[in-house]
Image: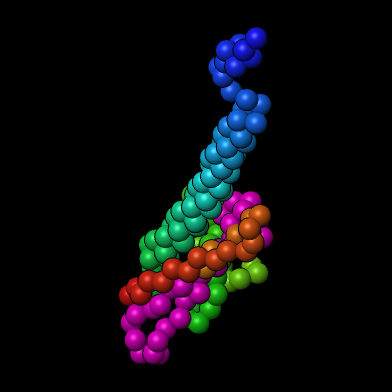
């Protein structure tokens, strides 16, 4: 009897099937890891965008208040009383009001380059802490 005729190679062997499953598993887990990483980066970018917003808002508030209401070379926090913004020296504002929300805090530092200069340098610092560490955004503007 000829056994070669009875044995036909149809289908895959168990070893081939294991290699195919392992190869597909590596690809699928790589794609999943990439997506998780993208979500983390997206969250980080979202927080940085919010921090830039809070810094820009602080610069606009200081500019709208005007230079006659603050003392140069002083660090301030922005106080919101009703619908009116004001600058309060650091520590004079209730810490809950000084924060922009639960995550961010901001301070405003106003300096005058020369005593006779009509220009003021406004520096806003926004700080926040998340799972990756402590972060800080600085924004500067010169106002008259």
Residue name at image x 46 percent, y 73 percent = 123
Residue name at image x 63 percent, y 58 percent = 132
Residue 126: quarter of image: bottom right
Q: Which percent across, then down, holds residue 98? A: 60, 60
- Does residue 42 lie above or below 28 as drawn? below
What colour scheme governs how the chains and residues are painted in the rendered image of this protein?
Answer: rainbow
Q: Is residue 140 left or right of residue 10?
A: left
Residue name at image x 46 percent, y 53 percent = 49
Q: Which percent across, then down, holds residue 59? A: 42, 64
In the displayed image of the protein, which residue is found farthest to the front? 1
Q: Is residue 33 left or right of residue 62?
A: right
Q: Which percent across, then down, holds residue 43? A: 54, 48
Frontmost residue, 21 versus 59: 21
Residue name at image x 45 percent, y 58 percent = 52
- Does residue 144 lie above or below 3 as drawn? below
Q: Is residue 79 visible?
A: yes
Q: Is residue 25 visible?
A: no
Image mark count? 0
Frontmost residue, 88 versus 45: 45
Q: Which percent across, then down, holds residue 118? A: 33, 82
In the displayed image of the protein, which residue is found farthest to the bottom? 115
Frontmost residue, 134 versus 84: 134
- Does residue 59 lie above or below 12 as drawn? below
The quarter of the image holding the C terminus is bottom left
The quarter of the image holding the N terminus is top right
Q: Is residue 4 magenta?
A: no
Q: Is residue 111 magenta?
A: yes
Magenta span of residues: 95-124
């Amino acid at each position: 009897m000829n056994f070669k005729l009875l044995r036909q190679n149809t289908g895959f062997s168990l070893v081939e099937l294991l290699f195919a499953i392992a190869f597909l598993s590596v690809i699928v887990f790589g794609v999943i890891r990439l997506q998780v990483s993208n979500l983390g980066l997206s969250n980080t970018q979202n927080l940085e965008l919010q921090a830039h917003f809070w810094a820009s808002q602080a610069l606009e508030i200081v500019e709208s208040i005007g230079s006659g209401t603050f003392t140069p070379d002083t660090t301030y926090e922005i106080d919101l009383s009703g619908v009116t913004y004001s600058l309060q020296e650091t520590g004079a504002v209730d810490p809950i009001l000084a924060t922009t929300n639960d995550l961010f805090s901001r301070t405003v530092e106003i300096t005058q380059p020369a005593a006779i200069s009509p220009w003021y340098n406004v520096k806003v610092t926004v700080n926040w802490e998340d799972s990756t560490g402590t972060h800080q955004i600085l924004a500067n503007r010169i106002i008259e």
